[in-house]
Amino acid sequence: MERSSARVRLINEGGAVPVSSNESHLLEIFQYFLNVPDSMIEKLLMIYTFLTPEEIKQTVENHEHNKEARIGQRLLAKTLITQLTNSEQKAEQVGNYSNYFHLNFPELVD
């Protein structure tokens, strides 16, 4: 399966999440990966990013020291949005929307 595919199925214990480049779903996708369990971060970074093993190890270590910041989840979500849209700017925008909703409407994003 090609990473740049417009439609990819990512499987977890709860089922499948359709990943589409359609803008109406980008925030939902970002939120989904922001909420993956800490125990899955290393594996998902290995599967869905082009990070080196050393970069993944460093990310996981940083994440372990500050779990509340969700460093690993944020990197995973931002990387996937960047890959889907071919735009780091769009990924930043979606991340900013996510932060805004989390701060102002936490009941909608948790």
Image: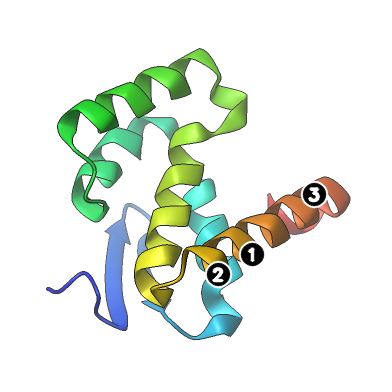
From the viewer's perspective, is 97 left or right of 35? right
Nearest the viewer among 30 and 83 is: 83
Residue on which the image places disc 1:
93
Whether residues under marks 1 and 2 lie with C-beta atoms below 8 angstroms apart, the answer is yes
Rendering quarter of residue 2: bottom left
Decide which of tag 1 and tag 3 comes sooner along the chain.
1
Residue on which the image places disc 2:
90
Rendering quarter of residue 37: top left
Instruction: Name the amino acid, label 3.
Output: Pro
Secondary element under disc 2, as helix, strand or loop, is helix
From the viewer's perspective, is 51 left or right of 72? left
Secondary element under disc 3, as helix, strand or loop, is helix
Residue shown at the point (25%, 54%) measured from the top left: 48
From the viewer's perspective, is 70 left or right of 98? left
| Residue 54 position within the rendered picture, expressed as x and y whole percent measured from the top left | 20, 26
Residue on which the image places disc 3:
106
The quadrant of the image that shows the N terminus is bottom left
Instruction: Name the amino acid, label 2.
Output: Lys
Rendering quarter of residue 96: bottom right
| Residue 101 position within the rendered picture, expressed as x and y whole percent measured from the top left | 78, 57
Real-space Cα separation, disc 1 to disc 3, in angstroms:
18 Å
- Asked if 5 appears above or below 106 in the picture, the reply is below
From the viewer's perspective, is 22 left or right of 103? left
Secondary element under disc 1, as helix, strand or loop, is helix
Q: Nearer the viewer, mark 1 or mark 3?
A: 1
Assess disc 3: are there few (<14), some (14-19) or many (≥20) residues with their C-alpha within 10 Å of its C-alpha. Answer: few
Give the numbered dot on residue 51.
none
Real-space Cα separation, disc 3 to disc 2, in angstroms:
22 Å
Q: How is the image coloured?
A: rainbow
